[in-house]
Amino acid sequence: MSNRVSDPAVRVERGVPVLIGADEMAQIDEAAVRLGLSPDALMESAGAAVAEVALAELGRLAERVRGPGGPLVRPPLVVILCGPGNNGGDGFVVARRLAAAGRSVLCVLAADASKLSGTSAGHNWSVLQAMAASGSLDLFVAPSSELLLRLRERIADATLLVDALLGSGASGPLREPISTAVDLINATRAHAVAAGRPCAVLAVDTPTRVDLTGGSRSTPVVTADVTVTFHRAKAGFALDRDARALAGRYLVAPIGIPLEAEEGIIPPDGEWPPARITQINWQEPVERADQAHRPGGGVAAGPGRTD
């Protein structure tokens, strides 16, 4: 076991946090599973963190004007748009947790349910189906852009939109119905802002689809108000100012990955991942020649306030 785990007193002092790319995060996830963390546990922790931020956002956005019989508007609606991968599986956990907390939830799978990847996403999808059957939330499958567009009036009522379409493993041009789902998220947000109605977009791990390593992005791309990524800040947002703008407030959430999972993947430079959900305040790039071989190695960032 390295000294950075067993003896924090010998950790190297440094001024910026570790920044990792998509490949490094995938390797760390795999190492965490080899160390005994189950994919189900990682997905549950990720979804729980996003749900916590979602509840805080709903509290900020909620209508506070009350009439003689109570609030003058309907309860805020959370619309969660999910893809077929692990990012969508995180979204399923968010939907379950928000519905269990009594929130009004509409969850949309923008894919064919038979194409869900991974047992963790499949398990959480089955739980959502049971909840939908009991009336705890609304659940729809929209494997085509035409079916997705039939839901646009329901989606337009959202106070909070959760982008769980594509995560770190995505690449290449957007395919349908994901591209249409991105357009719907952006249009709903823009329409609400123009109408003066509260509405925000919360992205899971990354706005669809901003690359975590270099910051490149798809066309179209989600514009988020807040992004929750996991374990460590990602280099793409440090390297690209436009990517930072698309992410909005950038939060890093721990999901239970031990520091040992990073052995041999990133240098033992003495910094611990955030122990709680923490906002990152990006700074301007600085020269760091000793870290030039790593994604984001020449970019400064600093943890901001903790939420």
Image: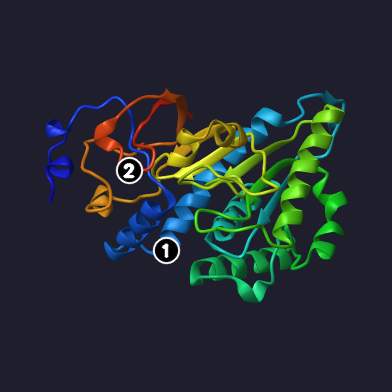
- Where residue 192 appears, x then y in whole percent? 81, 34
Q: CA distance from mark 1 to mark 2?
A: 26 Å
Q: In which quadrant of the rendered view does residue 193 lie?
A: top right
Neighbourhood count class around disc 1 (C-alpha, 10 Å): few under 14, some 14–19, many 20 upward: some
| Between 84 and 70, the one nearer to me in the picture | 84
| Between 100 and 39, the one nearer to me in the picture | 39
Q: In which quadrant of the rendered view does residue 223 lie?
A: top right
Q: Residue placed farthest to the bottom in the image? A: 114
User: Element under label 2?
Assistant: loop
* Amino acid residing under circle 1: Pro
- Where residue 242 appears, x then y in whole percent? 59, 33
User: Element under label 1?
Assistant: helix
Neighbourhood count class around disc 2 (C-alpha, 10 Å): few under 14, some 14–19, many 20 upward: some
Residue pointed to by mark 2: 294
> Does residue 148 sit above or below 10 in this rendering?
below
Residue pointed to by mark 1: 39
Res. 75 in view:
no
First of labels 1, 2 by sequence position = 1
* Amino acid residing under circle 2: Arg
- Where residue 295 appears, x then y in whole percent? 38, 43
Answer left or right for 146 relative to 203.
right
- Where residue 32 appears, x then y in whole percent? 32, 58
Answer left or right for 14 relative to 43.
left
Q: In which quadrant of the rendered view does residue 9 lie?
A: top left
| Residue at (32% x, 43% y) in the render | 294
